[in-house]
Amino acid sequence: MKKTLSKVAVVAVALLLLSSVLAMGAGEPEVDPDRVTVGLTLPSLGHPFFIHLQNNVMMEADELDVEVLALDANNETARQMSIVEDFIARGVDAVLMSPIGADALVPAVEELNAVDIPVATVDRAVADGDVLVHVGADNIEGGRVAGEYLIEALDGSGRVLELEGTPGATPAIERADGFHEVIEDTDIEVLASVTAEFDRAQGQSVMEDLIEAHGEFDGVFAANDEMALGAIEAIEAAGIDLDDVVIVGYDAIPDALSYMEEGRLDATVEQFPGEQARVALNYLYEYVQDGVAPPGNEHYIAPVIITPDNIDEAEDKVE
């Protein structure tokens, strides 16, 4: 009986290790002692934004001759925590992460701190812990420029629906804060602010409910493009003329730019995730390789509004 159980255990462990190796995708299963090795974990590669961010990490890593072990958290906090623990076990030199939640991933940062593995955050920040540097867009300013566009497009008055991002995620919080900051002294009324978890399908479902609950409205602000595109599908399905609604997204992903070219999306906010990725990786590399610390603990990139008039300024352009 003991032999049978031992064999089962061996097979189980082997399968677990194999699945871990296969999940790495872009990285080797073991750390190369002759190269700087960085563990990369992003919330979900189901989002084009994070695919673009990871692609830029990988391209910059090739330039620097950095080994990157990349694992997708599949939008699960517990999985992202486990990924960081796996990086520690593998002995990576540094970790680059975009945490799913500002509070939820603090323990992961603290575990890295305990073993002296430097960690940088990109796009999303953590609420506590010792982070070498956070590189991101100024999401409060991004919310402001989205709000300012709506104010101008609606001549300072109108009824607006807001789709918020994942609760607890810093971009969701900050984009909403910036948006409300600039519209509070106008005659724009926010009929409802509801989370759609940065997800296109949820954006469509939530917008269907909002249309049923509120009827007429003049504008939509979605805290990312995925939700904005889902909202557009719901608006069209409800028989509402898109020419009668001003819709603003955030991220400038290729699908959003395509919708803009088709006249279905009015504006989006570009926050340059590729630049964020390259800057963050360089900071980690310089610290690990040469002991050079970043000039500060935060590096913010100014977002810009993208409309049909300046669509070529978008970082991840439609080919």
Image (spheres, rainbow, N blue to C red):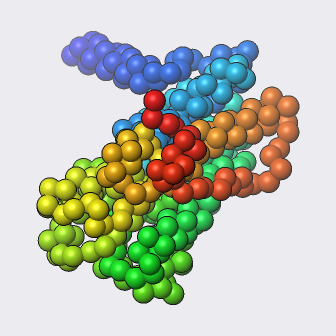
Locate residue 259 relative to residue 113 in the image: left or right: left
Q: Is residue 233 visible?
A: yes
Question: Quick check: 202 above or below 283?
Answer: below
Counting from the top left corner in percent of width and height, residue 179 is at 49, 71
Residue 215 location, x and y as percent? 18, 75
Observer-nearest of 251 and 87: 251
Residue 233 drawn above or below residue 27: below
Residue at 52% of width from left, 71% of height from top?
148
Picture layout, residue 147 above or below residue 316: below
At horizontal 44% and vertical 70% (from top left) the residue drawn is 153
User: Where, quadrant-wise, is the N terminus in this rendering?
Assistant: top left
Indicate left or right for 68 with 227 as reference: right
Q: Nearer the viewer, residue 185 or 11?
A: 185
Q: Residue at x 30, y 66 (%)?
A: 245
Coordinates of residue 90 in the picture (x, y in percent): 58, 26
Q: Quadrant of residue 117?
A: top right
Residue visible at 59% across and 56% down in the picture: 304
